[in-house]
Amino acid sequence: MTLRDPLRLGAIALSALMLLLAAVGPELAPHDPLRPDPMIRLAPPSAVHWFGTDHLGRDVFSRVLAGARLSVGLAVLVVLVSAAIGLVVGLVAGMGGRWVDAGLMRVTDAFFAFPELVAALAIAGVLGGGGTEVLFALAVVGWMRYARVVRGMTLATASADHVALARLSGVSATRIALDHLTPPLLPAMVVIMTAHVARAILAISGLGFLGFGASPPQPEWGVILLEARTYILSAPAYALMPGIPIVLAALAFNLAGDALRDRVGFAEPD
Amino acid sequence: MIAAALRRIAGAVFVIVLASFLTFLLLQLAPGDAVMAIAQARHGAGVNLDAASLARIRAEIGADDPFLVQWARWAWDLLRLDFGVSLIDRRPVVEIMAEGLGRTLELAAAAVAVATALSIPLGLLAGVWRGTWFDGVCVALATLGSAMPNWWLGVLLIVVFSVNLGWLPAFGRGDWEHLVLPALTLGTGITVTTARLLRSATIEALAARHIAAARGRGIGETRVIGRHALRNALLPVLTIFALEIAFVLEGAVAVEYVFGLHGLGLIFIEAVDARDYPVIQAFVLFSAVLFVCVNLIVDLLTLWLDPRTAEGMS
Amino acid sequence: MVSVPLLALDRLSVSVRAAGGQPRAILREACIEIGRGEVVAIIGPSGGGKSTLLKAVLGLTRFTHGRMTFEGDEIRRPHDAVHKRLRAAAEAVFQNPIAALNPHASLRATIDEPLRARGMGQVERMRHVDRMAARMGLDLDLLERRPAAVSLGQAQRACIARALAPRPTLLVLDEPLSALDALVAAEVAALLAEVIGETRPTVLFVSHDMRLVRRLATRVVVIEAGRIVEDAPAHRLLTAPESAAARALVDCDNRRRAALAATRVVRHRETVA
């Protein structure tokens, strides 16, 4: 177990670094991520261009750094929106009585029935691709986990005496939800949210790679890989390198999620 | 137990009906006028469209009926396995899907074979040898694997085996060699999840009380694992196999895209690209129905193997 | 004009259905009329349906048969308009203060909650909470703590302060002392008696603690096996109980008091000698 703790600390640190990159990544880029240079197209990795250059001669490392904003930043947004929707649905289901609960949970089941990538692809594609569209699509497929956990915990808390007393005192449902039911949910929510960032990063880059993400030339990790795909035989480094930050980011948030889960002692029900 | 089974079947049917409603709702997300969008998809964006052809499309999709009527008509057609015709080339969607299904099944079978061959020994042994270096390596690989998008893994495999080593073809369809890399990509992607589940199931099964009792009676370790642990791990294995099938279709989308295999997944991507709504809806709903059915089967098997679960869940 | 009772139960019955089992009657045809300002103790053996009666009144349990009226108006369904009026007029204190306090809120926020729900202004609320807390012997710095950081007795005082702060018409107490150890229970009982004496709500309470019954009750109702077996003014019931259940409880309490008196005499002699 001695090896585990530094690993987890590293994961949390790397997650923090990724969030930082989302904030300031574009400013750190050593070259202009959008400026083409036809003289150095598809150059292999070198001291000047760490990840090489792309088919237009743009610096891939700079594009990867700049891409963090969309890839990680958008993932965080997806997670926040999903968590908010799931929180509301779960609270309403948990507090609304038998029929509301049964109805909302069936709807949740129905949303759960679609494979995440398939549904997100269909929604983002029908909407036409782009940052907002991806956010919408991934929030639509991402809220159900929160709803289930929130609903389960809400049902447990709602039977507590302090909630019955608050109801008796005429405290509004909204206030009960905010003051009594939400605080005990937060640790579990943070655990799910951290792991969800990893999945959202994978999903965003996946949509980008399949051609339904942010529109080029805007750098996003999946979109960069999509552009590189054509040159997989002639410039394999270009086709591979931008995938490394995706794997690193997903790994970091996954491990950070595990670490938090153990810390909080919360096991997500299936 | 029959009652519990019926309840589960009814629940699954209800979820499928709701899912079909959601799938139909997808069309409403289309920006602008759906009729216009279809017309443009069919005739090209720049073309000037006369009122008559717009009216024809309008009548064709029944755009003037109330939403629920449109949904009911669509759902009724689905029940008769009529998924409509492609907006692009006017071929029946069922025909298009059937073509892709064969290729996807080929890939799926190969991938499930890879996944089963990898995950059962890896998951089982990692569970039995919990805490050893072998377990450590397995867990590390699984952790890494779950952070790796399978399409990128596909690219990686192409770079290694096609570009650098030149052993296998990178794209396209032909003899079995063309299936090796896609099946490996999809299969290892599934293995990450299933091996992990199997490992924890094995650990749980070994920790169960009657195993301890068997050990206490002096029954040999191999027999303990073979007879007792395996039986307890059977349920998870069934679950895992079902999950594999459910994952395959989703995973096939990206993998077929990377390797240029013209199966269901690639057909779906092309349909999304061209806004061929009937094809999109057919694939989306198909994947949902498959997922719900697989889950239902697992539920029913669980119920059959372990009737105690009938009370615990509702 | 005949005065209308604040709360009247007419042949009220509650039965529960255990999972998959037959319905079991917890409370059978209870008839009670409670006038304004009465302090009614409900006593009887454990499992007899005392707490269920309180829960039915508060709408925490559905009653299966019978009628319940509040200020003369019948409550037809749980949470109908009349029941809402009853609930708005009522506050309650439960047995376990740890479960009754929101673990994520300070004691101040908890005591403040019913006042805030009634739309009282912030400054007034703050003063009122301070006053109630002081009245219940809670230091002001305790008010900023969470329930986990105070003692059981302090937590129950906070619960009582919370219940009495909005000056409820009806105060319902369900075993308010049973989670507390003897010394703390005696303190809380004394405070409870004082505060009830000051604000004069109608009180309906369940307690095993005969000292609390002696101290608070103007009237005692005895429930055994789901039925009301005796209903009498407190002084009469405590001196001449008629039902077997009441006699058992009163006798037991008399023996305790006699024993206590005897030790007092012994102690007194020891200190004298």
Image (tube, coloured by chain):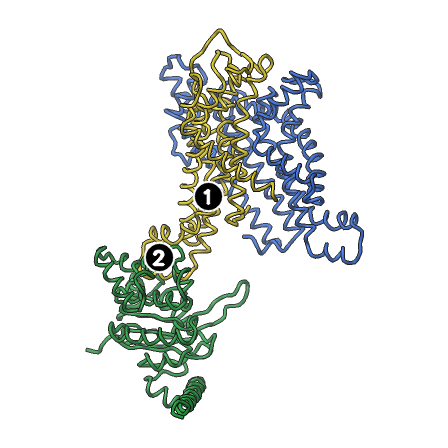
Chain colours: A yellow, B blue, C green
Establish if C19 lies above or below A107: below
Residue C114 x %, y %: 29, 60
The kind of secondary structure element at disc 1 is helix
Q: CA distance from mark 2 to mark 1?
A: 23 Å
**At 60% across and 33% down in the image, what residue appears?**
B144
Q: Which residue is mark 1?
A: A190
Residue C5 in percent (x, y) is at 27, 75
The image quarter containing residue A241 is top right
Q: Amino acid at mark 1?
A: Val
Label 2 SS: loop
Q: Residue at x 36, y 52 (%)?
A: A179
Residue at which label 2 appears: C106
The amino acid type found where label 2 is placed reads Ser
Q: Which mark is residue C134?
A: none
Chain containing mark 2: C
- Residue placed most toward the observer, A260 or C178: A260
Q: Nearer the viewer, residue B57 or B25?
A: B25
* Residue B82 shows up from this direction: no
